[in-house]
Image: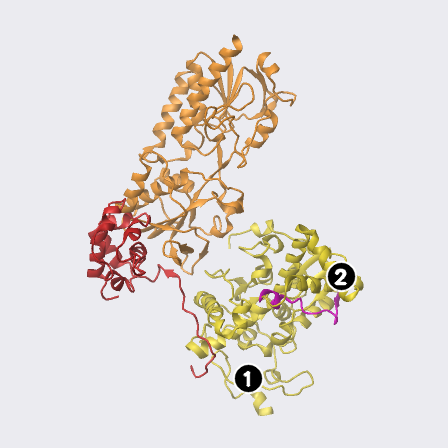
């Protein structure tokens, strides 16, 4: 794409020493991604990142669903900051886009309306006795991977190309709305052409698909999927994106938001069931990866160790194209080699029922 | 397929899609009555409409939709018109609005 | 001292200079670029009469030449006084302004006419429209250039089958700090839509507007002709984004506000009707001359009614789009008017 103006939207990204703020839902839907992120940061890049079991949900989903009041949310976020302060960290690395948006929004609110910060400090102190220093730097974890994309390329065992032909993989990147649509300045590349994922894809040899509905929301919403009757327009937004990207025959989708990755993946199953429509080039689904999984594959990590068996749409077609050596039989074996169960067959999946693990089972 | 009841259906797209809409009939109407396209959406026709005072008939909106290739229901809507002709008197662009009603009824009965 | 410095050699400046010369004064046009004519040089035809821009430009150039007006090309004004001090009534009474020019040159003058014009809004700031990203997104300025060069075509040289104009690009838009209406873009887009119709008889042509502002003589009539004779479709709604399609076209989204529904379509060519932005030199000039700026960054005239060419600074006058978006006709009228005000000012000083 003819565009270099992403360079005009730069943000400060701390180079080391982060307090890690995890996502609530990622650990269920993409359970290995956060572990993979920590592994990349610590093992591959040698960074100091503190994974704190004491921190909680940011309340983002509750807040955006009008369940949790703003004052409560601010006190909870203030507590995360206090935990970071106590642990001696000034930089926060946020795993979830909703959390990242919420943290930046709260900091901006405190900046514009100092009385809200005073109230949050008071509430936090009354409730927990904790105090905090405002973090020096807040970055989304995709920012950190972007920040280190050149170093990761140096360590790479493969590029995002077809192992047989050398052709770049066609990759759809999807950015969570709250990454840069709230504050364009808080995202690399701004809000119209965010570069955070595109930068990784291009650095590692893939090609980014620029399709008409690229900027469209995945439809996640908050109350829109929480309330069953509202899910119709949540899924319709994902369908709009999938229909728009399908003609480009993408090899995979990569997302930096827990909700987007989850819905772009799982709605494909629901759409196949409800409307008998699939969007992958082979008549199956389009695999959806997190950027940690993409980086992990580039670095040669084992897909099953990264939890990629938990995807709705099978990832094997991407693994095949990349030439990843993996053990098909190990897909549904857990960490101790114990069979963890396999999903039923679905139109979006690529492999039929006679899998080796069934034989083993 | 389709055996699972998820408790919701996929919402239909609301956008007027000018790549899909067939603009042929709208062009035919404009060819027979070129001033049809000169509407400036002042709403005078709807404000004075005898039928619109009593039903949700909105001549301005329906003829705009027709110009976008959205014909569904246009014929039925035009049946609400009482053909009194007051709208034609108020139109600042001199559109034969009554004639437009008749053209829509003649051309778009199948939609 | 009969010298009057005219800053800017566009239509307003040329007209002012010719009128000043006719009144027996010695105007000097200081022009930054390499030729007289300003942005009129980039235009093909002028609304609403489709008069070739060249005709108006040639007339002005000829008048400047006949009047033997001194013209300094490639020259910029650095400040109104050589030492950077503010001009005052005392300075004016003592013989006028010492205008500091680029290259260290200094020029004494009895009065100054600022006709420094406007800047074209940089459409690439509206990132969502993809200007300079997608090959077939153009501005109205690009279309005039293409018309001058002999033909409008897509990047691959082919003829567009569907063209959409987007009004108000860089106007009425807080997001790019352009709150004002540039007023000429509506009629420019209507004019160009009609030119497209003439070039491409079979094409679909759409104009997306927020309000159609047809303020001048013959403009509303032009608009009606565009609707009726040129079969240009007008849709009231601001385009929210443009994105590429797989076949190299551009998908746009807007609301059709008159029916209250979102709308999308793909087009071969997207033309952005760019607005008029305050000239980049306005701010610096206002600072050095102690003159006032309007909130939109244009120079603020002393009075919007009885003093629209007066600056409030003794001996400094304004003409043309330095103070607000204006048509060529309005700029020419202000050029003549500023010259009248200079003459009257110098007469008063002499008494």
Q: In this orientation, does residue A164 appear?
A: no
Q: Is residue C214 above or below residue C27?
A: below
Whether A62 is among the magenta residues is yes
Q: Colour of chain A?
A: yellow
Is residue A337 within the magenta segment?
Answer: no
Across and down, in percent, residue A68 comes to 63, 67
Total number of numbered discs in the rendering: 2
Magenta residues, as a range? A48-65
Cα separation, mark 2 vs mark 1, equals 40 Å
Q: Chain of mark 1?
A: A
Estimate the x, y position of residue A346 in percent, counting from the top left: 49, 82
x, y percent for residue C259: 36, 56
* Chain that appears orange: C
One can see residue B87 in this view: yes
Residue carrying label 2:
A17
**Residue ID at (41%, 35%):** C42
Q: Which chain is red?
A: B
Residue with the mark numbered 1: A343
Q: Earlier in the sequence, mark 2 or mark 1?
A: 2
Helix, strand or loop at disc 2?
loop
């Amino acid at each position: 794409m003819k565009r270099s103006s992403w360079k005009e939207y730069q943000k400060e990204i701390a180079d080391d020493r982060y307090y890690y703020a995890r996502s609530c839902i990622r650990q269920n839907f993409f359970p290995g991604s956060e572990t993979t992120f920590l592994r990349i940061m610590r093992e591959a890049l040698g960074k100091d990142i503190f994974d704190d079991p004491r921190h909680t949900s940011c309340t983002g989903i509750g807040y955006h669903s009008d369940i949790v009041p703003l004052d409560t949310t601010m006190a909870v976020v203030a507590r995360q900051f206090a935990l970071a302060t106590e642990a001696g960290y000034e930089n926060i690395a946020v795993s979830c886009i909703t959390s990242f948006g919420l943290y930046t929004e709260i900091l901006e609110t405190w900046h514009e309306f100092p009385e809200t910060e005073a109230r949050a400090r008071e509430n936090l102190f009354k409730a927990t006795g904790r105090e905090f220093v405002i973090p020096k730097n807040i970055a989304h974890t995709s920012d950190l991977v972007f920040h280190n994309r050149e170093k990761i390329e140096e360590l790479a065992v493969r590029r995002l190309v077809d192992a047989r032909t050398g052709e770049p993989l066609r990759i759809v990147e999807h950015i969570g709305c709250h990454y840069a649509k709230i504050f364009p300045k808080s995202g690399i590349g701004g809000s119209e052409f965010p570069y955070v994922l595109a930068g990784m894809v291009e650095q590692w040899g893939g090609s980014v698909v620029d399709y008409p509905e690229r900027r469209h929301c995945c439809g996640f919403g908050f109350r829109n999927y929480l309330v069953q009757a509202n899910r119709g327009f949540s899924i319709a937004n994902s369908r709009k994106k999938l229909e728009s990207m399908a003609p480009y025959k993408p090899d995979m989708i990569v997302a930096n938001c827990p909700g987007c990755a989850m819905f772009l993946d799982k709605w494909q199953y629901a759409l196949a069931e409800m409307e008998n429509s699939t969007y992958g080039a082979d008549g199956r689904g389009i695999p959806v990866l997190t950027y940690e999984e993409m980086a992990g594959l580039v670095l040669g990590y084992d897909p099953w160790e990264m939890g990629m068996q938990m995807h709705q749409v099978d990832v094997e077609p991407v693994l095949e194209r990349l030439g990843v050596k993996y053990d098909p039989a190990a897909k549904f074996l857990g960490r101790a080699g114990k069979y963890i169960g396999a999903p039923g067959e679905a139109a979006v999946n690529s492999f039929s029922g006679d899998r080796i693990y069934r034989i083993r089972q | 397929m389709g055996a699972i009841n998820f408790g919701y259906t996929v919402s239909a797209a609301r956008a007027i899609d000018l790549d899909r809409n067939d603009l042929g009939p709208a062009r035919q109407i404009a060819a027979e009555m070129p001033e049809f396209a000169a509407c400036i959406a002042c709403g005078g026709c709807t404000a004075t409409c005898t039928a619109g005072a009593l039903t949700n008939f909105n001549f301005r909106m329906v003829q705009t939709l027709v110009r976008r290739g959205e014909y569904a229901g246009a014929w039925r809507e035009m049946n609400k018109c009482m053909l009194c002709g007051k709208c034609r008197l108020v139109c600042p662009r001199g559109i034969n609005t009554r004639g437009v009603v008749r053209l829509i009824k003649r051309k778009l009965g199948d939609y | 001292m009969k010298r009057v410095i005219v800053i800017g050699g566009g239509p307003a400046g040329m007209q002012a200079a010719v009128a000043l010369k006719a009144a027996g004064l010695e105007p000097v046009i200081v022009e930054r670029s390499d030729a007289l004519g300003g942005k009129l040089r980039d235009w093909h035809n002028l609304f609403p009469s489709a008069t070739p821009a060249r005709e108006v430009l040639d007339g002005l150039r000829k008048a400047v030449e006949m009047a033997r007006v001194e013209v300094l090309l490639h020259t910029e004004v650095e400040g109104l006084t050589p030492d950077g001090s503010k001009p005052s009534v005392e300075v004016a009474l003592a013989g006028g302004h010492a205008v500091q020019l680029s290259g260290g040159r200094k020029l004494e003058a009895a009065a100054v006419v600022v006709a420094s014009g406007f800047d074209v809004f940089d459409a690439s700031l509206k990132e969502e429209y993809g200007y300079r990203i997608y090959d077939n997104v153009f501005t109205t300025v690009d279309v005039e250039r293409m018309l001058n060069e002999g033909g409008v075509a897509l990047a691959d040289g082919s003829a567009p089958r569907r063209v959409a104009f987007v009004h108000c690009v860089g106007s009425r838009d807080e997001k790019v700090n352009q709150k004002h209406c540039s007023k000429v873009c509506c009629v420019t887009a209507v004019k160009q839509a009609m030119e497209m119709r003439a070039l491409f008889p079979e094409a679909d042509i759409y104009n997306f507007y927020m309000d159609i502002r047809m303020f001048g003589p013959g403009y509303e009539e032009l608009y009606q002709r565009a609707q009726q004779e040129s079969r240009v479709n007008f849709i009231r709604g601001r385009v929210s984004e443009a994105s590429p399609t797989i076949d190299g076209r551009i998908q746009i989204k807007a609301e059709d506000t008159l029916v209250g529904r979102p709308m999308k379509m793909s087009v071969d060519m997207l033309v952005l009707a760019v607005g008029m932005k305050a000239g980049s030199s306005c701010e610096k000039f206002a600072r050095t001359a102690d003159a006032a700026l309007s909130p939109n960054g244009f120079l603020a005239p002393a009075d919007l009614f009885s003093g629209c060419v007066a600056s409030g600074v003794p001996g400094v006058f304004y003409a043309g789009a330095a103070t607000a978006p204006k048509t060529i006709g309005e700029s020419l009228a202000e050029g003549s008017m500023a010259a009248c005000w200079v003459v009257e000012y110098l007469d008063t000083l002499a008494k």
